[in-house]
Image (cartoon, rainbow, N blue to C red):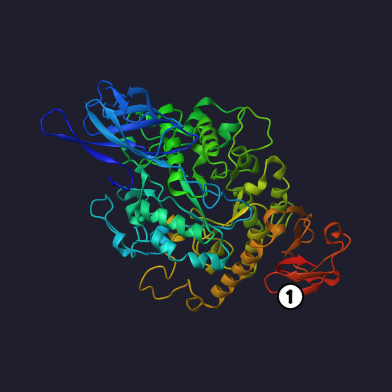
């Protein structure tokens, strides 16, 4: 337990000199919040302390105790509290029986929605990184003897390596120089888990997806203070922050599993039962109840208990924590992991409560779906169906895999770049496809440079699409310097350390001097596209017009009243000559085209793109 993360007080018990530790979730709140009715969870180490509901009262007129509830586990007490508009910030107290516990009220930050919690949209370029694998800014926090996994070992790809939030903070200028506007980390929440056996290997929770304490940032990443510092310094440089969140599951050593307030907080099975992973079961009009329940109640792995999100007490706990996190740290958006495995009414309630409190907050969700229809099902869509999701945007797997097809398949009726054309043609099913997050790879996938056979020409196609198609682009760390590998035999192969992020690294690829010729070419290519995109109204907020693929050439335009950008990818075997008549709807009135990466200017009437080339051109 850490004082900076939550309040932990030693209370004298009535029985002699014994003491019991009591923790309150949340330990503090704010005045001026729309969410002013709280359900405080009080946890004691004395198993009999709350067998009967004690009298609970407040010493502060603005803090009103409405109701007190005992839970099945008598270590816990639920105290319903209203924070009145008249309540003043300060250190207050709640009296529970004969004891008192502190409860602090802080003033709500007046800059919410202005300099913090600004939201993320299609004007941004997001950079996804894994803190443990990116850079080590403070070697003193690499390991702690009191944690279940108490070692860091860079020679073991399955162990923790010591990267932290200070390492990210030290490289903020690298991101701004690259043209990135937003940083997205895998979860920073405490993962006090031992190494778990997966397949043939013992793996650490370095990735952050095994929560064991919601209100604490992992000490090995620097703790709450380091996270707060990083968010503040990133905002000062104009960078935004996305926090990775998980509602579906926890680590098996979380107190919700080891000492649950009620057994109904976790979905129970006679023996380990995994989900069927078929998102279709939730939208299929012919699906069985058994398949639907298995999808949302099955445990992801034996060491990741599945939370029962239909339980109202647990739902309130998670919603309060999410609101607390946003106000406490001031980040700009959420990415929600394993979204399709969650109870659907809970998800809609969570999204609505967050937006009610923070109208500028952005949420996009991971529902690794098999079809474009399934991808759209989990966000605001145009379907007439019984259940309507309200998430703002999705991680766009459909478009990702279409881009892969465009880079790895020969052009065919439904293959190659036609997959991109066909996928975008279905955008009418989304309320706002610009809110989708688009990407080429991530921490759960083969790295894109390996996927395309380390073909530099095809890499330029992918980077062009990433930076110019509709939506919020996400770049996976190291893609700009062509980091590569397949998930063989495990995910660890695509989560290698960023070279130069640790003191004493033999090469430093954060600097041009540490990159080889092709890596530097890739960095500069990515940088040129990102910087152009950052100032381009057509690419960030403009409309899209695409044309049927002709002889392997895929042409689309991003445009508004101020600017027109033409993207041509010639995946065919012959040179592609722009036909002024075919594309006149978008090219009329223009005479020249400037390659935004090289600066070369072409006569539009004679523009010819060689086979294998992909160009992004601003029309003049």
Q: Is residue 14 above or below residue 568?
A: above
Q: Is residue 515 above or below residue 288?
A: below
- Give how far across and how far down residue 38 sits, in percent: 41, 31
Q: Which residue is drawn at 69% across and 61% down?
A: 536
Q: Relative to residue 231, is residue 527 drawn left or right?
A: right
Q: Residues within 10 Å of mark 1 (few under 14, many from 20)?
A: few
Which residue is under mark 1? 600
Q: Relative to residue 466, is residue 479 drawn left or right?
A: left
Confirm whether residue 519 shows in the render: yes
- Give how far across and how far down residue 130 sits, in percent: 44, 57
- Give how far across and how far down residue 346 sits, in percent: 50, 32
Q: Which residue is drawn at 61% across and 27% down?
A: 286
Q: In this view, does 618 lie above or below 360?
A: below
Q: Relative to residue 199, is residue 606 drawn left or right?
A: right
Q: Is mark 1 on a helix, strand or loop?
A: loop
Q: Nearer the viewer, residue 350 or 324?
A: 324
Q: How many discs appear?
A: 1
Q: Residue at x 36, y 53 (%)?
A: 225
Residue that sits furthest to the top in the current view? 52
Q: Which of 103 and 18 is in front in this view?
A: 103
Q: Which of 100 and 450 is in front in this view?
A: 100
Quadrant that contains the C terminus: bottom right
Residue that sits furthest to the left in the current view? 16
Confirm whether residue 200 shows in the render: no
Quadrant that contains the N terminus: top left
- Give how far across and how far down residue 406 sits, in percent: 67, 58
């Amino acid at each position: 337990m850490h004082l900076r993360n939550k309040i932990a007080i030693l209370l004298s018990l009535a029985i002699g000199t014994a003491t019991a530790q009591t923790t309150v979730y949340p330990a503090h709140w704010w005045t001026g919040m729309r969410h002013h009715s709280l359900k405080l969870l009080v946890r004691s180490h004395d198993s009999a302390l709350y067998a009967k509901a004690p009298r609970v009262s407040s010493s502060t007129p603005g803090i009103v105790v409405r109701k007190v509830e005992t839970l099945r586990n008598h270590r816990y007490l639920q105290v319903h509290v209203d924070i009145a508009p008249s309540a003043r910030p300060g250190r207050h107290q709640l009296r529970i029986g004969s004891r008192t516990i502190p409860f602090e009220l802080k003033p709500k930050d007046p800059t919410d929605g202005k300099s913090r919690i600004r939201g993320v949209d299609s004007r941004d370029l997001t950079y996804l990184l894994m803190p443990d694998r990116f850079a080590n800014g403070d070697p003193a926090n690499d390991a702690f003897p009191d944690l279940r996994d108490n070692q860091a070992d860079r020679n073991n790809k399955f162990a923790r390596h010591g990267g932290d939030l200070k390492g990210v903070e030290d490289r903020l200028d690298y991101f701004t120089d690259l043209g990135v506007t937003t940083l997205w980390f895998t979860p920073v929440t405490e993962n006090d888990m031992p190494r778990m056996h997966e397949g043939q290997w013992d793996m650490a929770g370095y990735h952050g997806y095994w929560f064991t304490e919601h209100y604490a940032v992992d000490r090995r990443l620097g703790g709450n203070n380091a996270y707060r510092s990083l968010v503040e310094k990133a905002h000062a440089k104009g960078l935004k922050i996305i926090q990775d969140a998980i509602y579906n599951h926890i680590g098996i050593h979380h107190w919700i599993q080891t000492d649950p307030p009620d057994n109904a907080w976790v979905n129970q099975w006679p023996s380990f039962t995994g989900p069927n992973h078929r998102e279709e079961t939730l939208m299929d009009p012919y699906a069985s109840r058994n398949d639907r329940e298995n999808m949302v109640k099955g445990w992801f792995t034996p060491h990741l208990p599945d939370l029962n999100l239909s339980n109202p007490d647990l739902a309130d706990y998670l919603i309060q924590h999410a609101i607390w996190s946003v106000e406490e740290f001031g980040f700009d958006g959420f990415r929600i992991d394993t979204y399709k495995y969650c109870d659907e009414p809970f998800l809609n309630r969570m999204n609505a409560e967050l937006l009610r409190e923070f109208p500028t907050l952005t949420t996009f969700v991971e529902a690794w779906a098999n079809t474009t229809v399934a991808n759209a099902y989990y966000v605001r869509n145009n379907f007439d169906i019984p259940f309507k999701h309200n998430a703002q945007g999705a991680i766009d797997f459909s478009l990702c895999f279409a881009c892969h097809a465009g880079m790895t398949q020969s052009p065919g009726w439904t293959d190659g770049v036609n997959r991109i054309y066909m996928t975008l043609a279905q955008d009418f099913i989304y309320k706002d496809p610009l809110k989708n997050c688009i990407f080429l790879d991530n921490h759960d996938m083969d790295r894109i440079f390996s996927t395309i056979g380390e073909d530099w020409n095809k890499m330029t196609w992918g980077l062009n699409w990433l930076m110019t198609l509709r939506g919020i682009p996400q770049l996976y760390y190291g893609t700009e310097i062509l980091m590569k590998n397949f998930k063989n035999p495990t995910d660890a192969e695509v989560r290698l350390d960023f070279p130069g992020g640790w003191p004493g690294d033999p090469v430093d690829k954060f600097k041009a001097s540490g990159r080889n010729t092709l890596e530097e070419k890739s960095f500069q290519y990515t940088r040129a596209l990102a910087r152009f995109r950052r100032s381009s109204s057509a690419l960030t907020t403009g409309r899209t017009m695409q044309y049927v693929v002709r002889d392997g050439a895929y042409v689309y335009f991003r445009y508004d009243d101020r600017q027109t950008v033409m993207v041509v990818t010639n995946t065919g075997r012959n040179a592609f000559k722009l036909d002024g008549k075919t594309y006149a709807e978008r090219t009329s009135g223009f005479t020249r085209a400037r390659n935004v990466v090289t600066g070369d200017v072409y006569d539009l009437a004679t523009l010819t793109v060689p086979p294998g080339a992909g160009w992004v051109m601003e029309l003049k």
